[in-house]
Image (cartoon, rainbow, N blue to C red):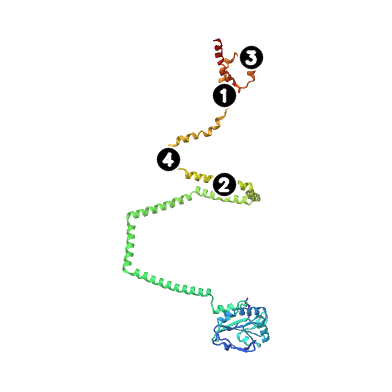
């Protein structure tokens, strides 16, 4: 991250860069004038070799050195450290650019980067981009030590986003100018058209036509009737609202609603109600989780779906229109026998046995002659065997026929 400084440089972009000649780590002297007319020069001041912030800054410039060289930028690092320290630092981190020694910090002072810092008096971390003409192109007041190469390239090569933004802004400005010009021309055209004799005549004719329509008796009468009806409706509404009974009813209704809302709120606030609601919700949730309930719900859903499907199928097969009317006329007799179907429970046998008893009663006088020998049998025999007696009595008349045959 960029480090904060306590002293700002007096140099600004566009000002001439202070010239200097300093010894480099290679043993050669390097001057800023050597780069005049050849390209850009990044002069960056850093406090000390092989310290955390300075190492990050140097490695950032090392990693982005190829891009900087393509952009025509040479890199010169300046600090108060000597050549031996510079060489060790450059060899340790494979730095491809020159490091210069400003032992008496005179160049620091010329660039305004020597002063009070958070660690005492020393180098204030700043960088200066010098153009081919020897003037300052940009001053990096706050250096991002981890992305310093990107900062430099961003100044020289605006990002696509920045270029797009600039082009959009230019297009918007041009469009605004064009719109303003078009609006002005339109206003001017409208004013010119309104001043023309033809337009004036048309406007006057329209106003006259409206006035003539308003003067017609039917229109006047319709307008008056409408106004009167509206006034009457407003008066009726006002009269109704002013009635004491209506006022009281409205007030009572409002009071009742407020009371009901308050009562509901009070009931909901009671702990017992809250506990009951919670228990009910929990019980419902537990019931839904039970396998039997799930199975029953699934079964009901399945049966409902099946019934709906069968109903749809039946509805689809059911004849409609003229065919349905014709079938209704032809088949009512066939449909009638289906009604007695629910009466099948009438098959109960006891009701048919009652008439059998009635048949047996009239036959008793005929049986009085052979009966004297078996009185006990009559008492013990229940009503059910009456049918057997009836059968025997029906067969009895054949005996006289046999007697007649014997006599013959």
Q: Residue 325, labelled with which disc?
A: 4
Find out whether the residues at labels 4 and 2 contact each other: C-beta distance under 8 Å: no
- The residue most toward the top is 407
Q: Disc 4 or 1, which lies upstream in sequence?
A: 4
Q: Disc 4 or 2, which lies upstream in sequence?
A: 2
**Would you identify the image quadrant in which residue 216 lies?**
bottom left
C-alpha distance separating marks 3 and 1: 28 Å
Q: Position of residue 301 (x, y in %)?
A: 57, 47
Provide the residue designation for mark 2: 302
Q: Position of residue 133 (x, y in %)?
A: 54, 86
Q: Residue 71, labelled with which disc?
A: none
When the figure is inspected, residue 150 is found, relative to residue 393, above or below; the finding is below
When the figure is inspected, residue 274 is found, relative to residue 342, above or below; the finding is below
Q: Position of residue 2 (x, y in %)?
A: 62, 77
Provide the residue designation for mark 3: 373
Q: Residue 354, labelled with which disc?
A: 1
């Amino acid at each position: 991250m960029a480090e904060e400084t306590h002293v700002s440089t007096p140099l600004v972009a566009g000002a001439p860069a202070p010239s200097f000649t300093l010894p480099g780590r290679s043993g050669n002297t390097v001057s800023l004038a050597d780069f005049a007319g050849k390209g850009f020069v990044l002069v960056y001041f850093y406090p000390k070799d092989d310290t955390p912030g300075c190492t990050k800054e140097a490695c950032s410039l090392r990693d982005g050195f190829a891009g900087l060289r393509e952009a025509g930028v040479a890199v010169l690092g300046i600090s108060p450290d000597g050549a031996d320290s510079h060489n060790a630092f450059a060899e340790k981190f494979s730095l491809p650019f020159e490091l210069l020694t400003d032992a008496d910090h005179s160049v620091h002072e010329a660039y305004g980067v020597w002063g009070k810092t958070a660690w005492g008096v020393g180098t204030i971390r700043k960088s200066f981009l010098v153009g081919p003409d020897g003037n300052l192109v940009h001053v990096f007041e706050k250096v991002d030590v981890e992305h310093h190469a990107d900062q430099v390239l961003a100044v020289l090569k605006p990002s696509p986003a920045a270029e797009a933004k600039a082009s959009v802004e230019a297009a918007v400005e041009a469009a605004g100018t064009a719109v303003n010009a078009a609006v002005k021309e339109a206003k001017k055209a409208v004013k010119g058209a309104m001043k023309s004799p033809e337009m004036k005549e048309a406007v006057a004719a329209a106003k006259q036509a409206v006035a003539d329509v308003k003067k017609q008796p039917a229109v006047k009468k319709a307008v008056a009737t409408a106004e009167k009806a509206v006034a009457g409706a407003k008066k009726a509404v006002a009269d109704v609202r002013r009635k004491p009974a209506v006022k009281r009813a409205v007030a009572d209704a409002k009071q009742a609603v407020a009371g009901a809302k308050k009562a509901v709120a009070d009931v909901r606030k009671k702990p017992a109600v809250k506990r009951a609601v919670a228990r009910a919700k929990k019980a419902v949730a537990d019931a839904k989780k039970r396998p039997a309930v799930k199975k029953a719900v699934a079964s009901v859903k399945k049966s409902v779906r099946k019934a709906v499907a069968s109903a749809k199928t039946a509805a689809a097969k059911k004849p409609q229109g003229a065919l349905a009317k014709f079938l209704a006329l032809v088949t009512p007799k066939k449909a009638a026998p289906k009604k007695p179907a629910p009466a099948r429970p009438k098959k109960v046998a006891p009701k048919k046995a009652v008439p059998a008893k009635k048949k047996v009663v009239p036959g008793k006088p005929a049986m009085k002659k052979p009966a004297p020998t078996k009185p006990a049998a009559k008492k013990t025999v229940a009503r059910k065997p009456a049918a057997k007696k009836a059968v025997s009595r029906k067969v009895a008349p054949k005996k006289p026929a046999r007697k007649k045959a014997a006599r013959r």
